[in-house]
Every structure is written in C-alpha cells, then in structure tokens.
Image (cartoon, coloured by chain):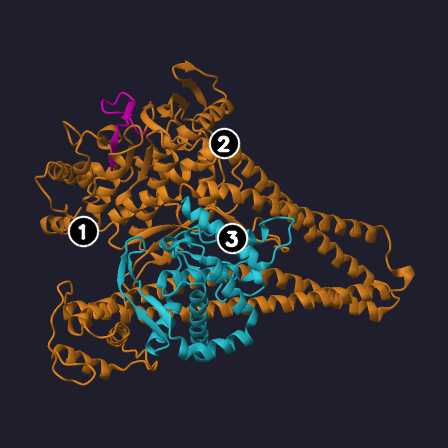
Amino acid sequence: MAMDADLRARQQSVRVLVLLDALARAGLVPTSAPALHELAYLANVLSPVFDLAPFDAKLLKRASGPYYPELQLAIDRLVGRGLVDAMKVEYRYLAEDKRYRVLAQYRLRRPLVRAALERHGQVFAQEAQFLHELAAAYSVLSDDKLGHAALQDARYADISVDVSEVIDFGEYDNPAKNFSRNAAITFAAGRRLEPAERLYLYLDHLNTRVAHG
Amino acid sequence: MAHFPLLEQMVVEHYGLYPGKDGQGRFEIPFRDGLTLILGANGLGKTTLIMMLFRMLTGTGDIPLPQGRIGSVDLSVQNLDRWSQRQFANRVNDGAQNASAQLSFQLGAKRFQVTRRLRDLALTTFIIDGEAADTEELTFRNAIAAAAELGSFGDWILVLRTLVFYFEDRRALVWDPGAQKQLLRALLLSPTLAQEWTRRERVILELDSRMRNLDSALKREKRESAKIDQKTTSAPGVRQALAAAQTHLDKLQERHATLVERLDLTDRMRHRARLDAIRAEAEQDKALRELERARLLTIDAHLPHADESIRFILARLMSDATCLVCGTEDVAARRQSLEQALEARHCVICDSPIEVSMPADVTEITDARLQTLKAAYDAFVVQAADQARERDEANAAHLATSTELAACAQERDEVDQKVRDLQAQLPPDQRRVTDQQRKLDAANELVIDMRARLKVARTEFGEFLGGHRAHIAQFADAIKAKFGEAANGFLFEDSQLSWSPTRMQVGQAGADGVEPVEYPAFAVDLTGSDFAGLKRRGDPEEVSESQREFIDLAFRMALVHVAAPSSAASLVIDAPESSLDAVFVERAATVLGLFAKTGNHGTNRLVVTSNLGAGMLVPRLLQEINAPGDPMAPVVDLFHAGVPTRAMVAWKEDYTALWTHLLNAVHGDDDSEPESEDERDYKRGDDDGHGR
C-alpha cells in the first residue's frame, strides 16, 4: 500500500502541474485554489468525453463546491519544492462547510517544470490535449464564476446525493451515473461533434446555468 | 400532502378496566392541544388504552408488518383474525359484552366520530362531519384514506404504526430503509402515484416469487428425471457421470445464489467504509487547515516580510511537522527549534535577532489554542488512517467475493454445458424425449420468459422511481432542518440527517444485469466520544438506547411537520422515559415540548403514557407545557378512572406519596428525584424487619 500511496502522490503532483499549465495557457493565471479544484473535478467527470478514465471517480460533496484534500496536499508539496508559487495565501471560513479553506493563488515556476510538462505532453498526449481543451472551455467563465460553476454541474448538483455524501461516477457505482458526461455527449443530437466541441458546449451550458442560478 | 389524525376525544363505556372516575362505567379522555398525559401504574391499562386508540383508527384491518425491518412486505390490508378482534374482550371477565369505545378526531378538514364494540371491534356508528355514514368497514377505510390523502388504507395503517404511534416495541423508522421508502412514498407523493408505485412493485415481487418457485420446482423435477435415467440399463457410465454432473450443478447454483447475496452485502459495506474514510480524510484536512491558519497567523506576526511561500512552508512545518520542501515527515526537532526561534524573535533562517513591527491586523494565537488544534489534528490523522485501512479491507473483501462469484459462474456454465453434453450422449431411444422431457423443456422456457419479464419490469420500475425519488428529495432539506432542531435539542453529540437513497434489488432473484433501484431514504450521522467528526450510524446498535429512541422520535416529528403542512397532528408515545437517565430528562422534556407546543395551522397533540414515579420526565414535561390555569390539567389519571391493582391496594401510601411528590415537583416545590423502589424497600425493611 505504501508503494501505491507514493505512486498516487506522484501522480497527483503531475496532475497539479498539468492542470496549472492548462489553466495558464487558457489565460487563467494565477489560478485560485477553488478554480484549480473545480477544474480537477470537471476533468474527472468529463474525461469520458475524450474516452479517458477519470483520475478519481468519486469525491465528498461539499456545499461550497469540489475540494480534494489529496490534491491540496499535492499543491502544498509543489509549493514546498519550489515548483509552484503560492500568492495571497489566506484562509477563509466557509460557513456552509463549517471549515477553513485555503484561498491562495497559484502559479507555475515554468522554467523549472517546462521539461517535465513537455515530456508529459509526449507520453500522455491525449490527456494533455483533453486538459488543454477543457481549460480553454473553462476560461469562458467570468472571474466571479470561476470556482462556483461545478455547483451547477449535472453530477455535482444531482439532488439524490446529499452534502457530506459521496458523489460516485464510476468508482464503485455504475459509470452510467456520470450525468455530466451523459449531458455533454447528448448535445446537438444527430450532429457529429468533436469531443472538444462537446466540452465547449457543456461549459457554455454551465456558464448559462451559473448566470441564472 | 397527507393529513395525520388530530385526536379530540375518546369515550370508553362499560369496559371493565376503566370504570371511570365515578365508577359508572364511562371513561372520557379528552385530547388537548399540546399534551395529554395518561398516568398510571403497572397493570392499570395504559398500553391497552393506547392500543384501543390505535384500533379505533384501524378498525378490523391490519397490515402484516414483521417484527424487525419491514423489507418489501405487502401492505395490503388483511382482516384481523378472531383472536385479535377479541383482544379487548379477552382482558375483562365479561368478555366486553356491552363495552364500546368512541373516538372523535379530525383529518385535515374533515371531522370523524367512530364507535366500535369492544367485544369484536365491529363498527357501530360512523359519523363524518356530523352526518351518519354507512357502517361497513370498507366505507370507513375508503373515507379515512381519502381524508388523509393517502393512496390506500394500508398506507394509513403504515403511517399510524410507524409514525404516529410509538409503541413499546420501539419499531425503528430511521434505521429501517424499507419502512422509510414506504412512508416517504405514502406521505410525499400524490395518492395516485403512491398507489402506482405500490402496484408496480407488487407486480415485480409477485413475478419474482412465481419465477423462483417455478425454477425451484423445475430443478427438483430435473433431479428426479436424472434419477430415473440412471436406473435404465443402457449407457450406465454416461448416466452415472450425468447424475454426478447434475449434483455438482445444483451445488454450484446454490453457491452462486449465496455469493450474489454476499456480494450485495460486501458492496454495501464498502460503500459505508468509503464514506467513513472520505469523511475522515475531510476532517483531517479541515483540522490541518485550521492549525495551519493558526500557525500562519503566528508566523505573520513574527516574519511579516518573509515571502508568502516561505511563510506557508514554515506554517506547515510547524503544523504537522512535515517539510514541504523535501517531503520529509515527522521533523519534530526542527519544528521545536523554529518555535523557539519565533518565541525569541529570532530569524528562523539565520537565528539573528529581528525587529518586528507588528501589523495592526495580525493577532497572535495562544499556545493553548495551538495545542488544542494540534491535538485535534493528531486525532484525525489516526482516525483517517484507520478508516482508510477499513475502506481498503472492505473493498478487498468485495473484490474477492466478486472474483469468487465470477469463478463460480464460469464453473456453473461449464458444468451446465457438461450436463447437456452428457444428455446428448445418451442413446437416442433412451433420451427420454418423452412427455416428461417436453414438460421440463416447456417449464424451462417459462422460467426464461419470466426472467426476461422480470428484467423488463425491474428496469421500468427503476426509471419510474427515478423521477419520483427526485420529487421526494425536494422535501429533504425541510425534513433535515426539522430533524436538526429536535435531535440537537436532545443529543449532546452533533447529529445530522443525510439524504442517502438506498440501493436495493426488488425481489430476491439475481440481478440479471439490472442495476438495483435507489429507494428514497435518510441516514443518521452522529459524532461520538471515541472518534472525531460525524460518522454514519447505519444500525440502531451503533447508538445508545436513549439516543436511538430520540433520534427516531426526532425523525418522526420532522416527517410529521413536513408531510402535513396544512394541519396539526398527533403523536402517541408509550412510556418515553424508559430509556432515559436523569441527565437526558430535561432535554427530552424540551424536545417533546417542542412538538406539543407547535404545529402547522394549529397546535399538535402529544399523547404520552407514563408510570407514576417513573422519573422526572413527567413533572418536567408538565412544567414544560405549563397548561394555563392548572399545570396538572393534561393528566388523565388512571388511578382514579381504572380498577386498582393489588399493588395499588397494598402500597397505597407509597402511591399517595408519589402523587404528592409529583404535584410538588410540577408546582416547583420539590426538584429531587422520588425515591427508587429499592430505597423504599430498604427503608421499609428497617421499619418492620420484613418489608411487605
């Protein structure tokens, strides 16, 4: 299990770097912690649109939106290793979740991670492309909506899962319960759309939903 | 939305147990706004009175609820057997020949008056809004179900049995997913939809039952047929092998069924373990961030000019002794030296003294606070690791069962094929392509057909349920909020109700590729003394007896409040004090008072039975309600309206003392607990040397 945990921690670190890179290329830099967690969540639910397996097909539902403790630990470690800059580090008490949450802004130290990101792009080309497309689609959200859009996501907003329960879209439960993926692939029925187009349509849909509550 | 009975008055006449205050055979029980307290002693007939109240509302019908969890029980109304119809007759020596009971109550906008003979529960008068109605039971049942806005009279009895009446058997509602699904269906869907749900479910259960019975009979016949084959003389080797293969196949099929059941259990266990683990991880993170924030405030105060990342790294090192730079964990010595440096106002890097200009908006957190946060964090670390281990073990057990099932299924298919091959090897004239074989084949076809229909029906039911579950979920927040008011008023621990639909297969036959349906359900989370954070309590055994009862009561109160928004309701509780220690009495009185003093469009009516001298709940409850004019007004006194028991005659003085104590306590003259029976026995022993 120790090996598994170590491997998982390394994978998380790489994932953070790739997510921050994708966000930066989409112009979302520095990136707030809530936006980073939100993109990680959207990447999980929407990866099947690109025929990719979710990195993590479950999370604890929180009233304030997606948050992965494991991902935050990976960010912290990357800050410690000097690969990521942490700015405006502050803790805000979230009454809805009854807890403090880190609301720092993060930015890659690109010269230090460029080689690793290039290598990742070569080995995991499809995943890298997916994350870049997703981050680009995510950037259509205005700043005030970043970090809040997932609350309107089809799977996250599903009322059959209560706050403080597990949202599962394929870990133990049937992947058919990934309503976000289901929604994304049913846009423009009868038309052949590229997976990337489906991501844009879905994020656009989220944007509209957030705007109208 | 539904209506619950708002009890007005019950009059019992000529029933031996209740001669009434003047002994003329008429006993009136007025149900007041707020509290009605039926006070007595063992043997005076409190429980009988509550049961009589129940039977006045159900008549001669009942639903066959099992002792434990409800499961998928058929809620069709069945007539009581003769013995049960005479349950009140059997308690008195005249067989209740001339006894009757009359109950007046409201259901929404309608007012009912029901009179029944107590010797057999026969309906003698039935009045709706002042107009006499037909006294057929069916008329009664239809009128009641319609006024309650429920789909059927079976649902009415279910509501009474699992929600309105809390009998001494303490039937758990919040821990019974079967009862919850039925109740949420009955209360929160329209009567038509509620009925349609039941109808569809029954179709599946009946088909499931018929299919399993037929399949079982078919297997028996196949075994018999194989035995006959074996007795014939030709191809004895093949026949012997066939018999052995058939026996093997039977065993594999049995094992397969067992494994399917076990798989369902391990799946539920791993879901539960995962929930606990992911919550523990969240709690650990919460504690870490709180500690980290506190540390950061300290560092901000001492190193206001340091780079933010540096400050963050130091805060973490001082929080959980982890170095984010190199990833080393447990660098406690370094943490200590950092703390000393900060305390001495020295630079943490070069140890030089530094001049600190304290920013105005930065506060220093006290060491005690930091130590508290650190201790909480350490506890969460242990708990999270433990829960993660349990999750992994539960998942491994599930995967092992799954692997075993797959292997079993494969072996079963192989042996099944072997049986077919051996059958094909029998001499053509002996292959028993006879009427018997054709019948078996026909039955086999029927089983296959029924299995296919079952699959379709299950799939359709799952889809039907999806939409209606979402409708019920809309009420979840209101139910949770109301539960929180009541439960947190009683419990010292934090508690919450979670909307947590339960996955269940409809029927007992294997899933056959169909996903289990998700029934609407709530679950209870509670903090505990031995672990941090809220933890799912999926079973009543996971909480104490008093917690169990009041959590269930809180859930009932919440459902009553939300399901009947336009009318007040009644709740009937038999002996609520039985599980309470003195500490909880005060809180229990407050919670029960919460129900009794409020209500939708009127004041609820709480009917409680209790023994005199059972503890301080009765006086506290009477104080809580504080009836205008006379705090003792809610009391229905069985001592003066019932037949004295031998104990009452023998211990008259003791009972009188208890009455006096109660009166004093209610009027605030005496706050002490009355003496226990042991204490009284002890003193009496001192007096006469022999006790009684």
Q: Are marks 3 and 2 in contact (CB under 8 Å)?
A: no
x, y percentage for residue A187?
A: 57, 50
Foreground label between 3 and 2: 3
- Specify few, some or many for label 1: CA neighbours under 10 Å numbering under 14, 14-19, or 20 or more: few
Tag 3 residue: A202
Foreground label between 3 and 1: 3
Gap between marks 3 and 2, in whole Å?
Answer: 38 Å
Tag 1 residue: B678
Tell me which amino acid carries mark 1.
Asp
Tag 2 residue: B191
Helix, strand or loop at disc 3? helix
Quadrant assignment, res B248: bottom right
Tell me which amino acid carries mark 3.
Tyr
Quadrant assignment, res A77: bottom left
Q: Which residues are magenta?
A: B17-41
- Tell me which label, 2 or 1, sits earlier in the chain: 2
Which chain is drawn using cyan? A
Q: Looking at the picture, do discs 3 and 1 lie on one chain?
A: no
> Is residue B36 shown in magenta?
yes
Gap between marks 2 and 1, in whole Å?
Answer: 54 Å
Q: Chain of mark 3?
A: A
Tell me which amino acid carries mark 2.
Pro
x, y percentage for residue B446?
A: 74, 48
Tell me if residue B434 comes above or below residue B619 in the rendering.
Answer: below
| Residue B167 seen in render | no
Which chain is drawn using orange? B
